[in-house]
C-alpha cells in the first residue's frame, strides 16, 4: 500500500526525509522516456524542462549519458540516469583505466565518470544558468552511475565557473567516484549539503576498489530491516550486511543486486516516512 505523501516542497532549503523521497522519485524519472518525465514534473509544479542525451565512445559498455533539468520559480532539479549493476560492474572494476584530474584540478576521478559527465555537462551548466532567473535553489540527484554524475556535476558547478554552491546533492546507490584529495576538498565545501543513501548490501557503493577510489561523507544507511541510520559503527555494518547476504553479490538474485535497484530505495524511504 502506497504511503500518502505531501507534494514536493519547492521552498525546501535543508535536509528533510520527505525531500529525499521526492529527489529519489526524480532520479527514477531519469530512467523514463523524456516525455513521461516532463509530464510528471509538470504535475509537480516544474514548468521548465530540458532533456540531455549524448552518445559517446568509451572503453566501457555504456552507450550514452542521459539527464534532465527541471525548474520552477523556486527550485531547479538536475537528475542523471543510472545503469544496471550488470552493466556497471566491468568498467567500475577495470584497473587498466587510470583516473584523471578532478574538477578545478582538485584530486582525481574515475575516467569513466569524467567522460560520461563531460558529454553533457556544458549543456547542464548553461541550462541551470538560463533557468535560474530568480535565485532558485539548485539540486542534483541520481541513482547508481547517475549518483556519481550528480556528485561530480555539483562539484564542477562550484569549483569551476559559475561557482554556484548547490543547495543539495542526493544520491542513491552511488559508486566510489574520486580519490581522497578530491573527497577532502568536496567535504570541506559540500558535506553539509550532500546525502549519499546506501541500501544495506548494495554492491555498487562497494566499487570501484578502494583505496584508489573513495566516497565523500554524509552517508545515510538503510539496514537489513530498511531502517535509516546516519552512520553505524563499522562492526555493526558488517554484522548487518551478513544478515541478508548471499554468496555472489553480483549474481542477479543476490542481495547485492536486489538492494541496488531504485524500487528498493523508494520502498525504504516510504517505510521510514510512514
Image (spheres, grey):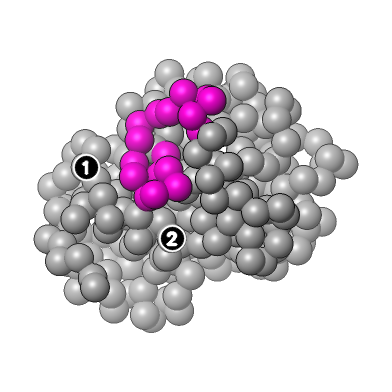
Comparing 40 with 133, the one in front is: 40
The residue that appears at 63% across and 60% down in the rendered structure is: 254
Q: Find out whether residue 227 is within the magenta segment.
A: yes
SS class, disc 1 = loop
Question: How many numbered markers are drawn?
Answer: 2
- The segment highlighted magenta reads 221-237
Give how far across and how far down residue 143 sits, in percent.
48, 55
Comparing 237 with 42, the one in front is: 237
Give how far across and how far down residue 7 sits, in percent.
14, 62
Residue neighbourhood size for the residue with mark 2, other residues' Cα within 10 Å, grouped as few (<14), some (14–19), many (≥20): some
250 to 165, vertically: above or below:
below
- On the rendered image, what quadrant is the C terminus found in? bottom left
- Residue that numbered label 2 is attached to: 264
Left or right, 217 with respect to 273, comes to right
141 to 212, vertically: above or below:
below
Left or right, 52 with respect to 4, comes to right
Give how far across and how far down residue 72 sits, in percent.
20, 59
Residue neighbourhood size for the residue with mark 1, other residues' Cα within 10 Å, grouped as few (<14), some (14–19), many (≥20): few
- Residue that numbered label 1 is attached to: 16
Left or right, 224 with respect to 55, comes to left
SS class, disc 2 = helix
Q: Residue at the far right: name it.
A: 96
Amino acid at each position: 500500500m502506497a504511503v500518502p505523501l505531501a507534494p514536493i516542497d519547492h521552498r525546501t532549503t535543508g535536509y528533510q526525509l520527505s525531500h529525499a523521497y521526492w529527489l529519489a522519485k526524480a532520479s527514477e524519472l531519469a530512467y523514463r522516456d523524456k516525455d513521461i518525465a516532463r509530464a510528471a514534473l509538470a504535475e509537480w509544479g516544474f514548468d521548465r524542462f530540458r532533456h540531455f542525451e549524448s552518445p559517446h565512445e568509451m572503453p566501457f559498455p555504456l552507450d550514452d549519458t542521459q539527464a534532465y533539468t527541471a525548474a520552477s520559480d523556486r527550485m531547479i532539479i538536475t537528475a542523471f540516469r543510472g545503469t544496471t549493476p550488470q552493466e556497471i560492474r566491468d568498467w567500475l572494476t577495470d584497473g587498466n583505466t587510470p583516473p584523471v584530474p578532478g574538477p578545478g584540478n582538485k584530486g582525481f576521478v574515475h575516467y569513466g565518470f569524467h567522460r560520461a559527465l563531460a558529454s553533457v555537462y556544458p549543456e547542464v551548466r548553461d541550462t541551470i544558468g538560463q533557468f535560474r532567473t530568480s535565485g532558485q535553489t539548485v539540486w542534483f540527484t541520481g541513482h547508481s552511475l547517475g549518483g556519481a554524475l550528480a556528485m561530480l556535476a555539483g562539484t564542477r558547478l562550484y569549483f569551476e565557473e559559475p561557482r554556484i554552491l548547490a543547495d543539495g546533492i542526493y544520491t542513491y546507490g552511488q559508486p566510489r567516484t574520486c580519490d581522497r584529495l578530491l573527497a577532502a576538498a568536496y567535504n570541506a565545501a559540500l558535506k553539509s549539503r550532500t546525502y549519499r543513501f546506501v541500501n544495506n548490501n548494495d554492491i555498487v557503493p562497494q566499487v570501484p576498489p578502494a583505496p584508489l577510489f573513495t566516497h565523500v561523507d554524509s552517508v545515510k544507511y538503510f539496514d537489513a530491516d530498511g531502517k535509516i541510520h546516519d552512520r553505524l559503527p563499522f562492526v555493526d555494518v558488517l554484522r548487518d550486511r551478513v544478515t541478508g547476504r548471499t554468496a555472489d553479490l553480483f549474481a542477479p538474485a543476490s542481495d547485492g543486486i536486489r538492494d541496488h535497484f531504485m524500487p528498493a530505495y523508494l520502498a525504504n524511504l516510504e517505510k521510514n516516512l510512514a
